[in-house]
Amino acid sequence: MASMTPGKRRRLQRCATPDGKLVILAMDHRNNLRRALNPQDPSAVSDAALVAFKQEVVAALGETASAVLLDPEYGAEQCITGGALPGSTGLIVALERTGYTGDPAARESSLVEGWDPQRAERMGAEAVKLLVYYHPEAPTAPQIEALIRQVAEGCEAAELPLFLEPLSYSLDPARKKLPAEAYHRVVLETARRLTAIPGVDILKAEFPLDSSAEPDEAAWLAACRELTATSRVPWVLLSAGVDFEQYLLQVAAAARAGACGVAVGRAVWQEAVEKLPPERGEFLTRGAQERMRRVAALCQALARPWTALL
């Protein structure tokens, strides 16, 4: 972090609140958003419907966020040209293809065809985000690390900050998710390894323990402190689709333990997928806006600025 270029510093400033807290609205969902909009037949959700939903969410919530995270296929350009993204709100562009390829126990990640940090910079992005499926013991771990280095080098050349989002997974085909103890270990080891890669600037992290298996909030705080001590860069907490009140408790623990903010998506707007206009718009401009303000207020009160590690 100490060697961060002036261009990266300036762009991170534009993604943050005036006192350095990151309050990011995540709206880069693609396949999982299609499934949410039509669980019976996701393929029936047209590209135009996906774009329209993203524009409606960003138009309603963009001013409550310090930055908005959008995908390059259905979100970023469309929210700029359609006027949904406020000019005062930072833009972070996701570079990864949605989902993963390869064996479920050896997952592979890749970039959207034709996209790299330089193209994101040309469209006016303040930063890019790279999501990878990662397990330190997976046979594809070296391949994923090489992809991160490739994107990090491009970000260095374009002077764009890199937000890295590693998602853990089980290596056991019989288990859909990692057991609680293994999950905690994997999240921490992932942070240790991947934030050591030069050019990674912000870690977009999973909550570092299974809060459904561990109700003790003192344990939550301890786990988040471990993550802060392990990560070599500032980190923000993703929401992973948990309900809003649960997410607020997680944010409070993360912020008290050293997180510099959030990247929140479904926890704020997920009910909107079940509604049609005008009820959808009413929910977004009332309920979802209020949720974003509550998350922002919590970050302002408790989170540390991203500059704290400089």
Image (tube, grey):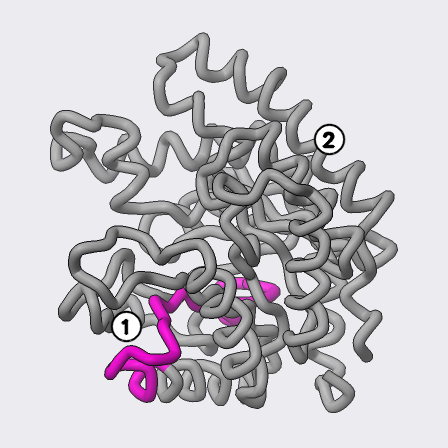
Residue shown at the point (25%, 51%) measured from the top left: 176
Between 178 and 9, the one nearer to me in the picture: 178
What percent of the width, then of the height, locates residue 215?
59, 38
Question: Of 80 and 38, which appears nearest the observer?
Answer: 38
For residue 154, side relative to residue 10 (left or right): left
Occupied quadrant, residue 107: bottom left
Nearest to the eye among marks 2 and 1: give it.
2
Across and down, in percent, residue 211 comes to: 54, 44
Q: Callout 1: helix, strand or loop?
A: loop
Within 10 Å of disc 2 (Cα), the crowding (few <14, some 14-19, many 20+) is some
Q: Residue at x 86, y 43 (%)?
A: 301
Q: Point out the stretch of residues depicted in magenta.
A: 121-144
Is 299 on the left-hand or right-hand side of 271? right
**Where the N terminus falls, by quadrant?**
bottom right
- State the residue in front, 84 or 293: 293
Q: Is residue 184 above or below residue 51?
A: below
**Quadrant of image for the C terminus:** bottom right
State the residue at coordinates (29%, 62%): 170
Alpha carbon of mark 2 to alpha carbon of mark 1: how far? Answer: 35 Å
123 magenta-colored = yes
- State the mark number for residue 22: none
Q: Which residue is label 1 attached to?
A: 110
Q: Is residue 299 left or right of residue 269?
A: right
Q: Which residue is mark 2?
A: 294
**Of the residues shown, which amino acid type is indicated by label 2?**
Arg
As for residue 91 lying within the magenta part, the answer is no
Image check: 32 left or right of 120?
left
- Helix, strand, or loop for circle 2? helix
